[in-house]
Image (cartoon, helix red, strand yellow):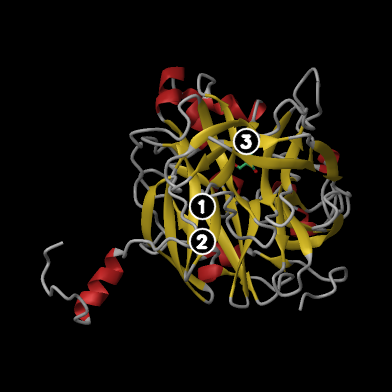
Amino acid sequence: MSLPADDREPSRWTRDHVRRLERTDENTAPIIYPPTEKTDPDNHIWDTWLLRTPEGDVAEVDGYRVVVALTAPSDLLPGKRHDVATHRFYYSADGQNWTPGGDAFGASGPLGSRQWAGSATYDPETGNVRLYYTAAGVRDEAELSYTQHLAVAHGGSIRVDDGVHFDGPWHHESLAHPDGTWYEREEQSRGMIYTFRDPWYFEDPETGEAYVLFEANTPVLEGSDACGGDPAQQEFNGSVGIARASREDPTECELLPPLLDAVRVNQELERPHVVYREGTYYLFVASHRHTFAPGLDGYDALYGFAADSLFGEYEPLNGSGLVATNPSNAPFQAYSWLAYGHRDEILVTSFFNYYDYDRPSLDDVAHLSEAEQFRRFGGTLAPTLRLGVDGRRTWIRGTLDHGHLPTDGETLPETEDERVARRREGGDARGGDGY
Ligand code: FRU
């Protein structure tokens, strides 16, 4: 049962948790090499999410699965892509080869001067599609602003003939703005990159209630005694927000207090989402090395927390929260991880970010020549990670190809560990090493 949400304290990600962070074989992904073909040669692709049913399963529409991704033309300098981000969709019959479907919103005029990450649902009973997104900036603004709010496009549907099409008319509605008490407003922000974004629709399987999770910041006002009154620490105030939503009414969105708070720990808890497995709620976020508060070291990584109810209390997975990161010689090779359940494991997709690049910070990308910035940016789906999971512990058990996103119906190949274990138990009928 979920708790009544209003007088609840958020769970905390603490400095002590983060001090335990360490790269190990269990959380470090193998090095990524460029694929022979990009998901979309005409566009950079970064944050990507699967079209899901309201219950959270990967949707299959007449045999196709669909992803929506942030995109920008591939001749644009990669670092500029956030300024023009557009949602495009891709579809696939086998979960491996993706066909570009075009601009997700067509000519319907989404909110914001560009659209940042979100989530997408398809209800097989009604055929309704909802596209949740971050309205970044304000439509038609003369100069780019960084204001953000949560929005939804509803009323559309999917049509399948010789391909997959998103049909309008889409109605764009604002869902939520920050309230200034639980969730920082832009004008309260103290310096680091401001966030109120990345709406993620989630239905609690134990109660059937609908919510939207999102990335936010906790207000820490100037002169407050939070973080020992240290302004340098007070800027780092990331949180995971939650709002009550509804399957019936796409515009319902009532802010509730945050699920998780990382004041004095980290500024950006990006793209929060939950995977439910047998009574445990796994809450995942992506975060960057450069957004950890002074005195803490972390990585560009997928971090995770687990609880026995949607409203917590959340404990960091693996003691520190670290679930999957990049190797030390390619620390920025992937980002914006998204986890989803697959049978007894969890799969994690992400995008192929900067490779052949091991400087301490992504900020140094700007010092490379433009040609090198293009050469070293992946801009396509990364190999999918396979996670083993047992209670509060996770480990990387293998990888699938770039952009391979299986549905539950698909049996995945045996991992190396499984093969060794099976052999040890004498389960290999051939008994030899002939394959
Ligand atoms: C993560 C992210 C998201 C945001 C998008 C903007 O990669 O920062 O939080 O919606 O990128 O491009």
Q: Residue 301 — which label?
A: 1
| Of marks 1 and 3, the one in the foreground | 3
Q: Quadrant of the N terminus?
A: bottom right
Three-letter amino acid code of the residue under disc 2: Leu
Label 2: how many residues lie within 10 Å, few (<14), some (14-19) or many (20+)?
A: many
Residue 66 vertical position relative to residue 433 in the rendered view, above or below: above
| Rendering quarter of residue 161 | top right
Q: Residue 283 — which label?
A: none
Q: CA distance from mark 2 to mark 1?
A: 7 Å
- Are the residues at dot 2 and dot 1 in contact (C-beta closer than 8 Å)? yes
| Of marks 2 and 3, the one in the foreground | 3
Residue that badge 2 annotates: 322
Residue that badge 3 annotates: 165
Give the secondary structure at mark 3. Answer: strand
Looking at the image, tell me whether mark 1 or mark 3 is earlier in sequence order.
3
Q: Quadrant of the C terminus?
A: bottom left
Determine whether, in the image, residue 132 is placed left or right of residue 302. right
Label 1: how many residues lie within 10 Å, few (<14), some (14-19) or many (20+)?
A: many
Three-letter amino acid code of the residue under disc 3: His
| Rendering quarter of residue 284 | bottom right
**The residue carrying mark 2 has its beta carbon less than 8 Å from ligand 1:** no
Give the secondary structure at mark 1. Answer: strand
